[in-house]
Each structure stands twice: as structure tokens, then as C-alpha cells.
Image: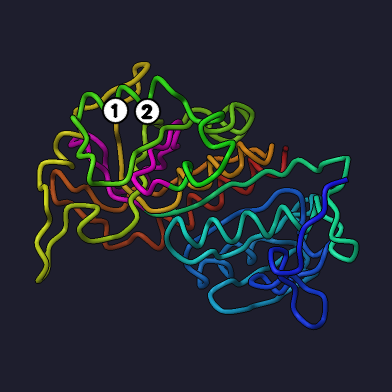
Amino acid sequence: MATTNKSELVLNSDGSIYHLNLFPGDLAETIMLVGDPGRVELIAGFFDSIEIKKQNREIHTVTGTYQGKRLSVMSTGMGPDNIEIVINEIDALFNIDLELKTIKSEKTVLNFIRIGTSGALQPDIPVVNSPLVSEYGIGLDGLAYFYEKGSEVIDGKLTADFINQLDWDKNLPKPYGIKASDYLLESVGYNWLKGITLTAPGFYAPQGRELRLKVCDKTIVDRASDFTYNDARVTNFEMETSALYVLSAMLGHNALTVCDIIANRITDDFNPDYKNSMKNLVTEIIKRIAKL
């Protein structure tokens, strides 16, 4: 079996994995991911019982049960870089023997359901009680290309079509497109609006926002909003989905993002009551996840 070096599989002095500060067995095989640590308590409030509560840096983890099903919820912080750390370390907890530093021959398949907030890029998408499922993710961060298997799991046609249609600037990271897990699309994402989610490596310039620093190309958002693929259109911007999808695909896991649309970049609408809207979304998602 393959082995990993101590400098690559980094553990804390107590044997827990470095950033998550968790041990094997601390997590359920179905894990809800959120960006905001405060949202962990919202979701864990639905659990019937709590087994584990741990926090390290921005990563807050709770494992418990809901209607007899063991579930975990974890905050990742923002951005594809945080997702890259979290998914690799979660997988290691299940599929690497941390003591022997060996990769297990039998792999555990995990379900990742990201619950986030997002801004819509189409004028007809409402901002109140509006769940949106990321059927596809398009990463503007370039993460997939750092991995040997990245080019094997991405959707080559989606990637090429996006690059060609937008006449993508070669000075920017190369985009990559990837589909969500079909299993989770059918079992969790049914009867909700679906679309293509753009994952940006930042909140300001990569999403066309300017404060004191100017954006190099202010047309990207408008041009991306016109892009379609397999009858799916670009629906929203956020900062995690493509990284979650590509890492999960390479590792053999299932992943799905469901966002509560709380703003519309085209109409300039905003939902000031988004906390209640998010609570409604969580209420429905956790019921669906309990049936997995």
C-alpha cells in the first residue's frame, strides 16, 4: 500500500489531523459544509443528539444524529484554498491509516453537501426563499490543474466551451468545469432550481467588484451570464463549489452545493431577512439528507 510522508500528512502532537483537529471516527459519512462558523450552530440545532463538538481556527465541527442518522456539520471558512485543506483532511480521516501513514485498500465514500449563500446572475431569480442547486461548477481559481487527476475528472467540453465563448484572458487562471454528483442531484437537489455556479478565487475583483482597486476586465460577469451548457445557464457566483466538486470527484466522493440566493447582482435586489430564509433551507435540506 502507498505511504505518505510525515511532512505531507501533518498531525498534531495528540495524533489529530492538523487543521481540523479531528480523529478518525469523529465525523459521519454525510457531512454538511458551511462557510460561516456561526451557521454550524444553526444546523446542529436540528440534531436530536450531539456526540462531538470541536473547534480549531475557523473550522467548527459538530457530529450528532437526526432521526436516527449520524450526521456532521463543519465550517470551512471562505474560498477554494480552505476547501482544498478541509476535503483532503476529511478524506484522510477515513481513507488513510494515520498511525501507519498508509492508504487504505478499501475506501469509504463520503457525501458532502455544501449549504451557502450566493448572489444571482440572472434577473428572473428571486432573492427570498430561493434555493439554487449547482448542477455544474466552473472554477476561476485554477485548482484542478495542480492535481494529476484534475484533467481526468473535469468536463472537457464544458471547460472548452466556456474558455472559447468568453475568449478567456490567458493571463488569468485557466477555468475548469465539473458536474455535481448525480447521486446527490437526484436524492437531495430534486425540484429546486439548478444552474451553473461560477467559483471565484476572491470576493472583490474576481467577482467584478471595485473599491479602491480597479478590475482589469469589467465585462467578465456580463459575458459569463450569457453562457449556457446542456440547457443550463450561469446562475450565480460564490467561492467554494468548483473546488469542492473537483476534489470530491478525484477522491471518489459525492458533492453538491445548495445556495440560498439572498441577492441579485443584475437587479440589485437583496433579502434583508436572509437568516430566516437560510433557516427554511436548512430545515428542508436536513430532512432530505436524513433519507440518504
Label 1 environment density (alpha carbons within 10 Å; few <14, some 14–19, many ≥20)? many
| Percent position of residue 283, x then y | 56, 51
Callout count = 2
Give whichever of 129, 182 is nearer the camera: 182
The quadrant of the picture occupied by the C terminus is top right
Q: Is residue 132 magenta?
A: yes
Tell me which residue sits at (40%, 46%) in the image: 142
Q: Is residue 290 magenta?
A: no
Tell me which residue sits at (47%, 67%) in the image: 36
When the figure is inspected, residue 91 is found, relative to residue 132, above or below; the finding is below
- Tell me the amino acid under the disc marked 1: Phe
Tell whether label 2 touches label 1 (CB within 8 Å): yes
Give whichever of 173, 69 is nearer the camera: 173
| Percent position of residue 127, x then y | 28, 47
Between the C-alphas of marks 1 and 2, the distance is: 5 Å
Q: Does dot 2 land on a helix, a strand or a loop?
A: helix
Q: Which residues lie in the magenta part? A: 118-142
Identify the residue position indicated by label 1 in the image.
Answer: 162
Identify the residue position indicated by label 2 in the image.
Answer: 159
Tell me which residue sits at (48%, 58%) in the image: 279
Give whichever of 18, 285 is nearer the camera: 18
Residue 109 as seen in the image, left or right of residue 156:
right
The quadrant of the picture occupied by the N terminus is top right
Q: Does dot 1 land on a helix, a strand or a loop?
A: helix
